[in-house]
């Protein structure tokens, strides 16, 4: 998942997998989500996973990321994961993320990566 070429293989596997296969891959991704989110190639796997997993899985995947806090929003790779969460997840499931952003719009707007969240 963190390999320059391997991440594409995993993304394609997620894209074409049946639910049982997605469940298996989700288990592996979930265990490494914090590391993958900050990785140049791993963040792409998480973004694809967010597109194909169930809403319940999405909630489980984002919880460790929200626990990391604002650092992920300012990260050159992590911000892309947060963007995908905002795009694909239900509003109620990202409400704590939205609340955090509300008080820091100016700070996020001035940051090269944070501005992408806004």
Image (tube, rainbow, N blue to C red):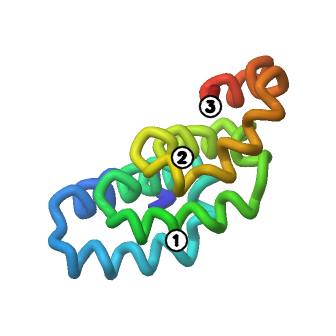
- Quadrant position of residue 74: top right
Q: SS at mark 3?
A: loop
The Cα atoms of the two marked residues, 2 and 3, are separated by 10 Å
Q: Of the numbered discs in the image, which one, if any, rests on residue 81? A: 2
Q: State which mark lies toward you, 1 or 2.
A: 1
At x 29% / y 58%, what residue is drawn?
Answer: 52
Q: SS at mark 2?
A: helix
At x 42% / y 55%, what residue is drawn?
Answer: 45
Residue neighbourhood size for the residue with mark 1, other residues' Cα within 10 Å, grouped as few (<14), some (14–19), many (≥20): some
Residue 60 spot, x, y in % from top left: 52, 71
In depth, the one of 87 and 99 nearer the eye is 99
Residue neighbourhood size for the residue with mark 3, other residues' Cα within 10 Å, grouped as few (<14), some (14–19), many (≥20): many
Q: In the image, is 108 to the left or to the right of 1?
A: right
The Cα atoms of the two marked residues, 3 and 1, are separated by 21 Å
Q: In the image, is 95 to the left or to the right of 22?
A: right
Location of mark 1 (residue): 60
In depth, the one of 87 and 91 nearer the eye is 91
At x 18% / y 67%, what residue is drawn?
Answer: 17
Residue neighbourhood size for the residue with mark 2, other residues' Cα within 10 Å, grouped as few (<14), some (14–19), many (≥20): many
- Quadrant position of residue 66: bottom right
Residue 84 spot, x, y in % from top left: 47, 42
Location of mark 3 (residue): 117
Disc nearer the start of the sequence (2/3): 2
In depth, the one of 42 and 102 nearer the eye is 102
The Cα atoms of the two marked residues, 1 and 2, are separated by 14 Å
Disc nearer the start of the sequence (3/1): 1
Q: In the image, is 80 to the left or to the right of 88?
A: right
Residue 15 spot, x, y in % from top left: 22, 56
Q: SS at mark 1?
A: helix
At x 57% / y 51%, what residue is drawn?
Answer: 94
């Amino acid at each position: 998942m963190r390999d320059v070429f391997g991440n594409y293989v995993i993304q394609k596997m997620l894209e074409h997998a049946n639910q049982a296969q997605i469940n298996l891959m989700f288990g592996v991704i979930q265990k490494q989500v914090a590391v993958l989110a900050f990785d140049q190639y791993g963040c792409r796997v998480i973004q694809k996973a967010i597109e194909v997993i169930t809403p319940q899985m999405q909630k489980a995947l984002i919880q460790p990321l929200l626990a990391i806090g604002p650092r992920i929003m300012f990260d050159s790779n992590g911000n892309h994961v947060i963007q995908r969460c905002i795009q694909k997840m239900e509003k109620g499931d990202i409400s704590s993320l939205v609340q955090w952003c509300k008080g820091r719009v100016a700070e996020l707007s001035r940051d090269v990566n944070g501005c992408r969240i806004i």
